[in-house]
Image (spheres, rainbow, N blue to C red):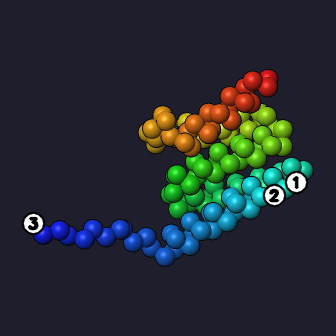
């Protein structure tokens, strides 16, 4: 029986470049927020730009991660209501994508939601 080599799908260069741009934006936002929580507006701007980019290139998993990171940044800055809104959107999108209920990312979002809901 002959085995065929399965090749990974090759992503268009533009998509790869946009994915790296998304990563840079979201990472920059996280770094700003964790280094100095008073820079939350700057951090939020970078992450929202990353989310917009992900939505533009129809990379829903990237957008979902963006909402998670945005919620965590807003939690760091003690902006509870905004954090809850972002994390609820994140959880909703994970469920729409039918992510396994024991997924690391879904559980991370739920843990953040639980922390925020207990501080009300």
Q: Is residue 76 above or below residue 56?
A: above
Q: What residue do we see at 68% from left, 58% from top?
A: 26
* Helix, strand or loop for disc 1: loop
Q: In this figure, what is the number of numbered marks?
A: 3
Q: Position of residue 62 (x, y in %)?
A: 56, 55
Q: Position of residue 99 (x, y in %)?
A: 46, 41
Q: Position of residue 36 (x, y in %)?
A: 87, 54
* Helix, strand or loop for disc 2: helix
Cβ atoms under marks 2 and 1 closer than 8 Å:
yes
CA gap between label 1 and label 3 equals: 60 Å
Q: Is residue 89 visible?
A: no
Report the quarter where the N terminus lies. Answer: bottom left
Q: Quadrant of residue 90?
A: top right
CA gap between label 2 and label 3 equals: 55 Å
Report the quarter where the C terminus lies. Answer: top right
Give the mark nearer the N terminus: 2 vs 3. 3
Q: Position of residue 68 (x, y in %)?
A: 65, 45
Q: Any mark on residue 36, and which? A: 1
Q: Is residue 94 left or right of residue 30?
A: left
């Amino acid at each position: 029986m002959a085995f065929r080599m399965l090749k990974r799908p090759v992503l268009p260069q533009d998509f790869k470049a946009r994915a790296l741009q998304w990563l840079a934006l979201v990472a920059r936002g996280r770094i700003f927020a964790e280094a100095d929580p008073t820079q939350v507006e700057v951090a939020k701007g970078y992450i929202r730009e990353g989310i917009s980019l992900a939505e533009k290139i129809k990379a829903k998993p990237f957008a979902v991660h963006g909402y998670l990171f945005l919620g965590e940044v807003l939690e760091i800055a003690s902006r509870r209501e905004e954090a809850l809104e972002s994390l609820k959107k994140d959880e909703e999108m994970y469920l729409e994508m039918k992510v396994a209920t024991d997924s690391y990312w879904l559980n991370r979002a739920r843990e953040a939601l639980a922390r925020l809901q207990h501080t009300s």
